[in-house]
Amino acid sequence: MSKGNADQEIQILREKVAACTLLLNFHNIMNYSGHVSARIPGTETFLIQPIDQPRSGLRPEHLLLCDYDGKVLEGRTGSKPPAEVALHCELLRARPDVMSIAHFHHDMTNVFTLVEDVPLHLLKNHSVRWTSGIPVHNDPSHVANPDLGRAVAKTLGPHHALQIRAHGQVITAESVEAVLIDSVHFVENGMANYYAASIGRIAPLTKQDIANFERDFKRQRHIDKLWQYYVDGGRTQGIIPKEWTLY
Ligand SMILES: [Zn+2]
């Protein structure tokens, strides 16, 4: 790829990370804290927002380019990565298949880590994404150094999401678009668990339910459809600039 094309690809990735963050914030999945990262394909670098940039006003040019040690390679002078950048560094290092990570602190989903006998189940059909499991990382600390980041990566193992007890969620996916849609579905499933548990005994998806759903499910087509839905909605609401190249 020529340098011009590579620069253009990175600019598009910046716009997608900014849009994903704004949409997660707008839809009350990510609040004043949390972050989305995206690996630059073929490199050991990634984009992430600065520590002190409000999520509600993130722009592509705010994003920092960091290496896996959390060192800022490109960014505004004095800009620092988030305090939990080690979470992104160590997950990207451990999982070459992961291209984008969202970390947020959604209380009504996290509540399932606060009780002893009500785990988060697979209830809604799109929760089949997490059939392999949703581990709970027991240490509620901020993931503020590489040792803590490696511990989270170990808890995640080969799975696609985890909950950090009394803290928040980590969603991993193959693209920024996918990480947005997986985050939406993760929280939808968490809320479904909450509502279902409040009126009766939870009846999780069965193995047969999961097999039936997956038989006809086209993940990329679903991601493309919902990404466009959320981006168009964001543009209508005036939170996503029309000039960003998002699809
Ligand atoms: Zn956190």
Image: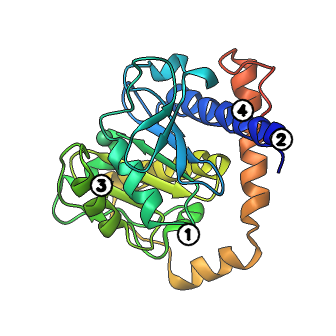
Element marked by disc 1: helix
Say if residue 246 shows up in the picture. yes
Q: Which residue is mark 4?
A: 11
The amino acid type found where label 3 is placed reads Gly
Say if residue 59 shows up in the picture. no
- Residue 39 vs 155, above or below: the answer is above
Question: Residue 176: x and y, percent?
Answer: 63, 46
Q: Which residue is mark 3?
A: 149
167 lies left or right of 192: left
Foreground of the two, 129 or 79: 79
Element marked by disc 3: helix
The amino acid type found where label 4 is placed reads Gln
Q: CA distance from mark 4 to mark 1?
A: 32 Å
- Give the number of the disc on residue 128: 1
Q: Nearer the viewer, mark 2 or mark 4?
A: 2
Mark 2 Cα shell of 10 Å, populated few (<14), some (14-19), many (≥20): few
Q: CA distance from mark 4 to mark 3?
A: 27 Å
Question: Residue 17: x and y, percent?
Answer: 61, 36
Q: CA distance from mark 2 to mark 1?
A: 36 Å
103 lies left or right of 136: right
Q: Nearer the viewer, mark 3 or mark 2?
A: 2
Q: Which residue is mark 2?
A: 5
101 lies left or right of 69: right
Q: Earlier in the sequence, mark 3 or mark 2?
A: 2
Foreground of the two, 128 or 143: 143
Residue 12: image quadrant is top right
Q: Are marks 2 and 1 in contact (CB under 8 Å)?
A: no
Q: Earlier in the sequence, mark 2 or mark 4?
A: 2
Q: Earlier in the sequence, mark 2 or mark 1?
A: 2
The quarter of the image that holds ligand 1 is top left
Question: Residue 40: x and y, percent?
Answer: 62, 48
Q: Earlier in the sequence, mark 4 or mark 3?
A: 4
